[in-house]
Image (cartoon, helix red, strand yellow):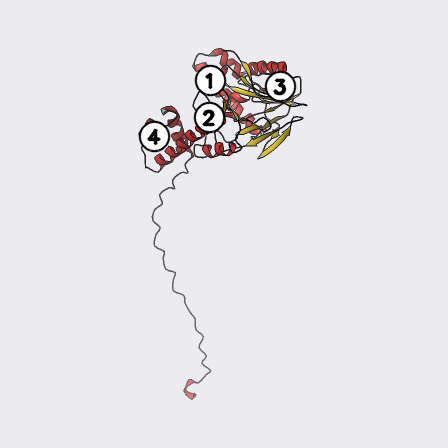
Amino acid sequence: MSDRWIEVAPRVWVRRLEELDQSVGLVIGDECCLVIDTGISAESGFALATAVREKTDLPWQVAYTHDHFDHWFGTSAFGESAIWAVGDGAHYVSVGDEQRKAWAARYRREGREEDARRIGATKLVPPNCRVSGAIGLDLGGRTVVLRQVGLAHSDNDMVVEVPDAGVLFAGDLLENGAPPSYDGAFPYEWPQAVEYLLSWKPAIVVPGHGDPADYWWARAQARDLAEIARLCGEVAQGFLSEEEALAHNPFGEAVMRTALDRCKALAPAAPEPQAPAAAPTPPPPAVVYEVFDYSVDLTQR
Ligand SMILES: [Zn+2]
């Protein structure tokens, strides 16, 4: 399979990338277009930018669904443009630098020298337009909504809604063909975030990885995410063993293990046991100095 376009609604495209089975987006208005995520490296970003130019000559803006490297390391190919995200630029630079080093080291360990070089050479392009809550972005003749959601898959998730076409770009809040990733996720809050973003019943839902699907597919995955949260809660409260949760869950043992570990990491630390407080020492008796008036002859009363 090579990279290919799917038109999910009029002038709303999904680019299916071979690498990591990603789905990135393109929404075309009358005056400009919006590119949703840019791929894992400068090379993949350049290929995406070239493919976008096959569809439109309009100026582009870029939206990052979240800060995981595979969603924004390709942006250097897009030159100067408005880049929308929930996290701010400083956050992206700091997190991006960590991910660049960590993934280059990981690829090197796996003997994937070319991939290590590609990711190590990535020029980080942080966002320059911050989304807090939700904004409507006018592309000319159509307005898309950039909406902050979460905590969920990460602490900076953003989805893109195309209301006139009934399309939702969900980032990694939903994944098709592979289980959702709980690394750095918030297992208890995630299902609520998905319920919220599905509340307008989008007809087409584009996951961050895997094929576009419909509303009912997304609802089914929302139920599975809620089941993971329920299992995590029961384990945390001692109603269920970890072994039972690992053996009976919608996404398999590895995903459940990550979710359980993540819940433990997020749980507030138990308070340090304190030595019993010493009995309070009574205050010293107050000394009362009474002034006796000797000038009064009490015998005369
Ligand atoms: Zn992700």
Residue 172 makes an appearance in the image: yes
Q: Secondary structure at mark 3?
A: helix
Whether the residues at callouts 2 and 3 have beta carbons within 8 Å, the answer is no
Q: Secondary structure at mark 4?
A: helix
Whether the residues at callouts 4 and 1 have beta carbons within 8 Å, the answer is no
x and y percent of residue 226 in the render? 42, 32
Q: Residue at x 62, y 13 (%)?
A: 54
Question: What's the distance in space between the residues labelled 4 and 3, CA to CA?
Answer: 45 Å
From the image, tell me which residue sits under label 3. Answer: 78
Q: Earlier in the sequence, mark 1 or mark 3?
A: 3
Whether the residues at callouts 4 and 3 have beta carbons within 8 Å, the answer is no
Q: What crowding class fits label 4: few (fewer than 14 Cα within 10 Å), some (14-19), or many (20 or more)? A: many
From the image, tell me which residue sits under label 2. Answer: 217
Q: Mark 1 is on which residue type?
A: Ala
Q: Nearer the viewer, mark 4 or mark 1?
A: 4
Q: Nearer the viewer, mark 4 or mark 2?
A: 2
From the image, tell me which residue sits under label 4. Answer: 245
Quadrant, the C terminus: bottom left
From the image, tell me which residue sits under label 1. Answer: 105
Q: Mark 4 is on which residue type?
A: Ala
Question: What's the distance in space between the residues labelled 2 and 1, CA to CA?
Answer: 36 Å
Whether the residues at callouts 1 and 3 have beta carbons within 8 Å, the answer is no
Residue 151 makes an appearance in the image: no
Q: Mark 2 is on which residue type?
A: Trp
Q: Secondary structure at mark 2?
A: helix
Q: Earlier in the sequence, mark 4 or mark 3?
A: 3
Q: Nearer the viewer, mark 2 or mark 3?
A: 2
